[in-house]
Image (spheres, grey):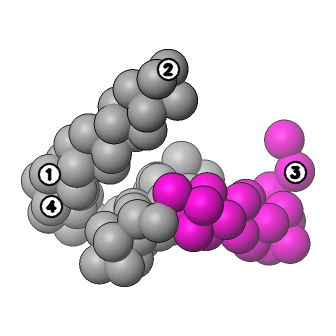
């Protein structure tokens, strides 16, 4: 996996395009993008993440992730007809 900044920004742009396509609420979109950035930091620079920051992001992000999953479930149901 390529970990250079261009690759990472490209992946974040892919998430942005999907969010735009699904017409996700802007607040949810921003939260989800922040979670993606945090995930990248956690995976690739875990030693720089404070445990308290990790737990705070996890707790906040879990609610938003559930909202996103609900949105995806609705989209799947619409696609199935």
Camera sees residue 5? yes
Q: How far apart in space, not on screen, are marks 1 and 4 (Cα)? A: 6 Å
Q: Which mark is residue 2?
A: 3
**Quadrant location of the N terminus in the rendered image:** top right
Q: Earlier in the sequence, mark 2 or mark 3?
A: 3
Q: Which residue is mark 2?
A: 80
Whole-percent x and y of residue 9? Answer: 74, 71
**How many numbered circles does the render carry?**
4
Q: How far apart in space, not on screen, are marks 1 and 2 (Cα)? A: 26 Å
Crowding around mark 2 (Cα neighbors within 10 Å: few <14, some 14 to 19, many 20+) is few
In front: mark 1 or mark 4?
Answer: 1
For the point 15% across and 61% down, which residue is it?
Answer: 60
Q: Which mark is residue 60?
A: 4
Magenta-drawn stretch contains 55: no
Q: Which residue is mark 1?
A: 63
Q: Secondary structure at mark 1?
A: helix
Whole-percent x and y of residue 20? Answer: 57, 69
Whole-percent x and y of residue 25? Answer: 33, 72
Q: Circles 3 and 4: CB distance less than 8 Å? A: no
């Amino acid at each position: 996996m390529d970990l250079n900044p261009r690759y990472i920004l490209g992946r974040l742009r892919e998430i942005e395009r999907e969010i735009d396509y699904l017409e996700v609420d802007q607040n949810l979109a921003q939260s989800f993008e922040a979670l993606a950035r945090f995930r990248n930091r956690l995976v690739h620079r875990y030693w720089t993440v404070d445990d308290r920051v990790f737990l705070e992001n996890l707790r906040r992000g879990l609610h938003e992730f559930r909202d996103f999953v609900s949105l995806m479930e609705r989209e799947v149901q619409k696609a199935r007809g």
